[in-house]
Image: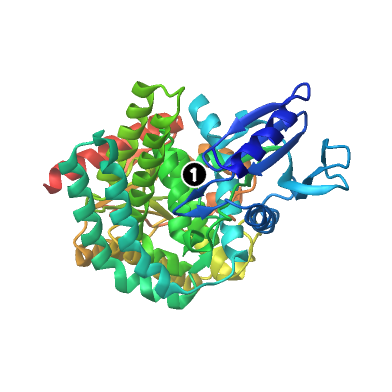
Amino acid sequence: MTGETAAQERIFKVLCAHPGVTRIDTHAASVFLDGPRALKIKRAVRFPFLDYSTLEKRKAACEEEIRINRPLAPQIYHRVVAITQEPDGSLKIDGRGQPVEYAVDMSRFDESRTLDHLAKAGPLDANLASAAADAIAASHEAAPRADGAAWASSISGLIDGNSNGLRKGHHLEAEEIELLGQASHAMFVRLRPLLEERGRQGFVRRCHGDLHLANIVSIDDQPVLFDAIEFDAGIATIDVLYDLAFTLMDLLHHDQPRAANIVLNRYLAATPPENLDALSTFPLFMSIRAAIRAQVTLARLARPEAHQTGILHEARRYFDLARALIHPPAPCLIAVGGLSGTGKSALARALAPGVAPQPGAVVLRSDVIRKQLFRVEYTHRLPPSTYRPEVTARIYEVLVQRARQVLAQGHSTIVDAVFASESERDELAAMARECNVPLSGLFLVADLATRQARIGGRQGDASDATQEVAAQQEHYNIGHVGWATIDASRTQEQTLQRCRDAIARQIRQSD
């Protein structure tokens, strides 16, 4: 034990002597919980990736943690406080004596409300998942731009670092580790020009850097990002999609495919459309993140209280996820058509999580794209002039264009629109043939009373359709549909199952 660590242990014992104080240790910090307050002290350690070996370095690290995290979570992070030795030899928090240690002064939150705990308890709430995507998108918008070339050059090292770390302890098969590394390097070689271009476009930023579920907490039913990386700006200077990939991967690990798909689609809708041209990065990014978590999990075996079987099982699950993600299956195209009120958007959202590759299909909705093109909020009602035939034709052009973008990245998409005319359906089918991907077309039908009742019950939706519009649509000349016609007049679960059966039939017929 060094002099620094011995001095720290004396301080830690004094802090723990107060009634009701709980101490939690990690590899680099000790946190002291006392009622609504938490004090986080950097441990006097030095690793290849951080150095807290001196008091000055620990003070600087505390100040950096406040600087990085307070904008993300002002309700948690407050200030840096000194732990002082008073003239009588006693220790005091924020005293007037000689500083002998520094701590991050924080508000305690309910640890059971972090997203990893919530995910273990059951399906995550859709509104919480959407809000998490908004919080991540907002953090990326505020993050300063950085050197994209340095980020791209670092990825090879990340892959090799994972391979080397996973070999330690011989807990995983060496051949599987080698194959994962080879596949990751091969994908990186293909993606490197895209990654370098994204760096030039400003998508490499000083991000959170560690956005797994345990670092997102629900406070007053709103997600708060915390514990961003402060000890090494290089680790957190990354493509914004690599930051997002940690959350997506961890949602998949926690058996939350619906929440992962919600986060993906919400984030894409809230950020520049250029991100659609980088969907091909997710298999590599998520796989690297899963391998990192496998390493971190295996490192817990060194703790005296470690439960070896449970730790090895979780590490193996992360490792298997990394291996699966690096080999994504071929994409597909699903079209969901039907008059207003037939339940197209609800169906598209329900189908999307189960459409490979992970984390599910990108949903392209005509109502949302119309609002984006007119630069209004999704729930803002547009005037009738924005529904002129030439405007609607433009909306369908954009739908097809964006679907093509998604498919070109090796990702699946679900296109949600009325598709009332044969020409609209034919144009989408022609694009699918050009991209050499299978198209599963679904056309939902329901009686007018059902459609009007559903429209009347909508709240906070992107659609501008009214009950009057639904009545007018009864006179549309739909023509020859050519897609699977689905009775959508019953429950959403029944419609979903009918659509899944129809897609399976269409796939069998195309084989």
- Where on the picture, by quarter, is residue 499? top left
Against 241, is 487 above or below? Answer: above
**Residue at left offset 65%, top offset 59%:** 381
Secondary structure of the residue carrying numbered label 1: loop
Residue wearing tag 1: 212
Q: Position of residue 130 (x, y in %)?
A: 56, 46
Q: Position of residue 438 (x, y in %)?
A: 21, 54
Residue 299 visible here: yes
Q: Position of residue 474 (x, y in %)?
A: 47, 50
**Residue at left offset 43%, top offset 41%:** 250
Instruction: Classify residue 322 as left or right of residue 461.
Output: left
Quadrant of the image containing the N terminus: top right
| Nearer to us in this view, 324 or 401 | 324
Outermost residue, bottom direction?
Answer: 200
Against 256, is 65 above or below? Answer: below
Q: Position of residue 46 (x, y in %)?
A: 51, 50
**Residue at left offset 39%, top offset 30%:** 301
Instruction: Classify residue 462 as left or right of residue 400.
Output: right
Q: Amino acid at mark 1?
A: His
Q: Residues within 10 Å of mark 1 (few under 14, many from 20)?
A: many
Residue 344 visible here: no
